[in-house]
Image (tube, rainbow, N blue to C red):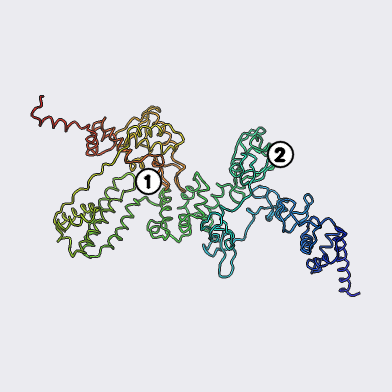
């Protein structure tokens, strides 16, 4: 007998076996629909062979719908009108229309449920998850920890794991550069990166539906992050459990407690005879893992080292302080996010690779200006670059843009001389005397812009500065209410014989309003006694409301201005040359702030210790007065009205000379404040001396 004849006979036998198995489920069933369904499903001998083998091994497979070839036959039979067989449905998730696999315990299950049924502990992160691959030692690895292909990214040029493979004219895109396509989310209506962007129902990550369950620990109905022995656990409880430490009853060591399951656990994994999970593969610490079996601290060390080595074996010696500063951050996840997407991290990579020189000039010329400016503060704080006055350096470069706006060449020369020999020279002298290294340049910029506007106006009127007269100036001031800062330029020009002396009246002083005394004391009481308010905000607000200090001075206060005068219970604070004894409870708040520091608000790369009482986000720099004002406004404290109320009260009780020395005010300012509330007795004495009816 020829081979194809044997194959034909075997095929007919298998077809008969399948037909008999189907008809056995319902004796009233005719052969016509079965033959039609069989022709659709078993169009290839291999499919017929698999179908016959499955039905011979288990005739009940038709009611389970598994393996997949049997499920396709059941679907074809139902399409032919056979209703005695149930639609194939996963025994675990109850979804229909999926290819089912035989399970010894549950029957037919879909691929996702089968993967969960066969889940094992990942060899890298220790979490029991579906197996996505095997490591070189053939141990199971989950999808998050599984190795993905690493190729050169078509956007950033780095060799990284590829998130989207090349297709058409589009190159490979790494996981750091990939962004989902933007579409109008069907849930929130925002134009946002969405899944299913090409469909009629795109959905962003925030609106994507997630299965919820009652958390076994907190009882809230939330999306579970893990399914433990006690039940589903939500994300907050999951993180808290992984980071919880306690003394084990068995070994008395400080470990994560896992047995019995739940919040009442009192035994570590080793003493309970359980496998240790969620342990960092580098340092061995039991913690919530960040990537590839590493905790966030070890992941930060690995990524920082890779960035700074730039393909070499060693980190450049000049960048080692930067490496240590990044690792010393109190929030490793923030540092990891900065390394992944921060503009400053990209500039740091250029420095490590040698494509950008390690100088201020190279950072000034870098196209990523904001990232270069932030990295500059990191480098200066780590003593890699010498410190410089950043506002002064910026205004020196900014002057060229102001000069370009002046049309007349002679006027441009005059403005350049004024900027060089008056404004910048004065700023440099102040910077040399300043202890903060941060010169205020707001008003000098206003003076230069105002002078440029005045010179352009003269050019439009057909005048030159030497031909300008008082009437011309008065006309311009009448049209330009903000033109009074031109006084400094005209004074300089007259002194150097570029114009005649002209008078610019002083702008009216706006005294403004002050808060009510009762409101002020209510705010003071809250700052001194409300522990829910941030410590730095409490101290800054108290210095404003109790001592009338400007925000610009509070922001740059240093820790060495707080002293203990030989007794830990006596705290003094220095505003100028003299010290003030600070009473409780403010003295305790000052001591706590000086000792603990403002760690939560520091940026990546900040030094471990800071000389500033109020460190800012920029490494090595204090908080800005503007940001400090924003934080106080969130507490209902407006700086100017609050300071006016404070100085009015202090001036009514303290002589002007004492007020000036203690609070670091100029004598003229202190005298003006004492005169305003009527506490200056010199005017009263002079009035009495001029009265003829006064009897001494």
- Identify the mark nearer the N-term, 2 or 1: 2
Secondary structure type for disc 1:
loop
From where the camera sits, is residue 161 visible?
Answer: no
Q: Which of 250 and 693 is in front in this view?
A: 693
- In the rendered image, residue 687, in percent from the top left (x then y), is placed at 13, 32
* Mark 1, other Cα within 10 Å: few <14 / some 14–19 / many ≥20: some
Classify residue 549 as left or right of residue 115: left
State the residue position of label 1.
624
630 lies left or right of 49 = left
Query: Which quadrant of the figure has residue 497?
Result: bottom left
Residue 576, disc: none
View extreme (left): residue: 692
Q: Are marks 2 and 1 in contact (CB under 8 Å)?
A: no
The tally of labels here is: 2
Q: Quadrant of the C terminus?
A: top left
Rendered location of residue 531, percent (x, y): 45, 34
Residue 532, how many percent across, how many down?
46, 36
Write down the quadrant of residue 662 in the picture: top left
Q: In this view, does 249 lie above or below 182?
A: above
What is the quadrant of the N terminus in the image? bottom right
Q: Position of residue 218 (x, y in %)?
A: 61, 39
Outermost residue toward the top in this view? 696
User: Based on the displayed image, in which of its 4 quarters is residue 549 positioned?
Assistant: top left
Q: Is 177 situated above or below 647?
A: below
- Sort mark 2 into few (<14), some (14-19) or many (20+) by Cα contacts within 10 Å: few
Nearer to the camera, 218 or 72: 72
Q: What numbered label is drawn on residue 273?
A: 2
């Amino acid at each position: 007998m020829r081979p194809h004849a044997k194959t034909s006979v075997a095929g007919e036998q298998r077809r008969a076996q399948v037909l008999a198995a189907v008809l056995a489920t319902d004796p009233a069933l005719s052969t016509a629909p079965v033959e039609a369904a069989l022709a659709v499903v078993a169009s290839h001998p291999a499919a017929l062979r698999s179908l016959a083998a499955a039905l011979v091994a288990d005739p009940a497979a038709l009611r389970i719908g598994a393996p997949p070839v049997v499920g396709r036959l059941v679907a074809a039979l139902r399409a032919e009108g056979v209703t005695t067989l149930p639609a194939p449905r996963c025994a675990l998730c109850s979804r229909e229309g999926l290819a089912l696999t035989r399970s010894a315990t549950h029957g037919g299950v879909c691929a996702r449920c089968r993967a969960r049924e066969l889940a094992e502990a990942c060899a890298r992160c220790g979490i029991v998850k579906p197996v996505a691959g095997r490591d070189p030692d053939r141990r199971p690895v989950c999808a998050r920890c599984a190795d993905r292909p690493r190729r050169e990214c078509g956007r950033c040029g780095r060799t990284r794991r590829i998130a989207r493979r090349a297709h058409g004219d589009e190159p490979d895109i790494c996981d750091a550069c990939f962004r989902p396509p933007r579409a109008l989310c069907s849930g929130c209506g925002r134009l946002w990166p969405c899944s299913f962007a090409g469909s009629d129902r795109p959905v962003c990550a925030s609106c994507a539906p997630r299965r919820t369950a009652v958390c076994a620990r907190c009882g809230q109905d939330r999306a579970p992050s893990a399914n433990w022995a006690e039940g589903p656990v939500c994300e907050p409880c999951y993180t808290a459990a992984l980071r919880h430490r306690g003394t084990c009853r068995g070994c008395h060591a400080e470990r994560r407690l896992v047995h019995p399951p739940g919040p009442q656990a009192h035994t570590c994994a080793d003493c309970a005879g359980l496998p240790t999970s969620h342990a960092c593969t580098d340092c061995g610490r039991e913690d919530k893992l960040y990537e590839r079996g590493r905790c966030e601290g070890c992941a930060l060390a690995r990524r920082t080292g890779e960035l700074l080595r730039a393909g070499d074996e060693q980190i450049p010696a000049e960048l080692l302080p930067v490496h240590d500063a990044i690792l010393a951050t109190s929030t490793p996840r923030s540092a990891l996010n900065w390394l992944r997407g921060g503009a400053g991290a990209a500039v740091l990579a250029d420095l490590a690779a040698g494509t950008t020189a390690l100088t201020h000039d190279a950072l000034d010329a870098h196209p990523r200006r904001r990232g270069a400016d932030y990295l500059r503060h990191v480098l200066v704080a780590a003593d890699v670059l010498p410190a410089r006055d950043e506002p002064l350096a910026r205004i020196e470069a900014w002057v060229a843009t102001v000069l370009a706006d002046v049309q007349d060449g002679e006027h441009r020369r005059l403005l350049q001389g004024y900027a060089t020999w008056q404004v910048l020279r004065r700023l440099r002298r102040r910077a040399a005397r300043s202890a903060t290294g941060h010169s205020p340049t707001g008003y000098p910029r206003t003076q230069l812009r105002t002078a440029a506007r005045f010179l352009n106006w003269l050019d439009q009127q057909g005048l030159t500065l030497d031909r300008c007269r008082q009437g011309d100036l008065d006309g311009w001031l009448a049209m330009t209410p903000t033109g009074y800062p031109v006084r400094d330029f005209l004074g300089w020009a007259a002194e150097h014989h570029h114009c005649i002396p002209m008078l610019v009246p002083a702008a009216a002083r706006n005294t403004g309003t002050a808060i009510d005394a009762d409101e002020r004391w209510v705010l003071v009481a809250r700052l001194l006694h409300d522990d829910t308010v941030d410590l730095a905000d409490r101290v800054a607000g108290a210095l404003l409301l109790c001592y009338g200090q400007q925000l610009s001075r509070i922001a740059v206060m240093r820790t060495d201005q707080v002293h203990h005068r030989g007794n830990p219970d006596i705290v003094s604070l220095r505003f100028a040359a003299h010290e003030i004894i600070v009473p409780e409870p403010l003295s305790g708040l000052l001591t706590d702030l000086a000792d603990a520091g403002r760690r939560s608000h520091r940026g990546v790369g900040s030094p471990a210790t800071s000389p500033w009482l109020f460190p800012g986000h920029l490494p090595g720099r204090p908080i800005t007065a503007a940001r400090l004002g924003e934080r106080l406004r969130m507490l209902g404290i407006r700086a100017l009205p609050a300071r006016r109320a404070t100085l009015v009260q202090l001036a009514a009780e303290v002589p002007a000379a004492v007020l000036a020395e203690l609070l670091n005010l100029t004598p003229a300012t202190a005298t003006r404040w004492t005169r305003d509330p009527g506490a200056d007795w010199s005017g009263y004495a002079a009035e009495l001396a001029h009265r003829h009816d006064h009897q001494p």
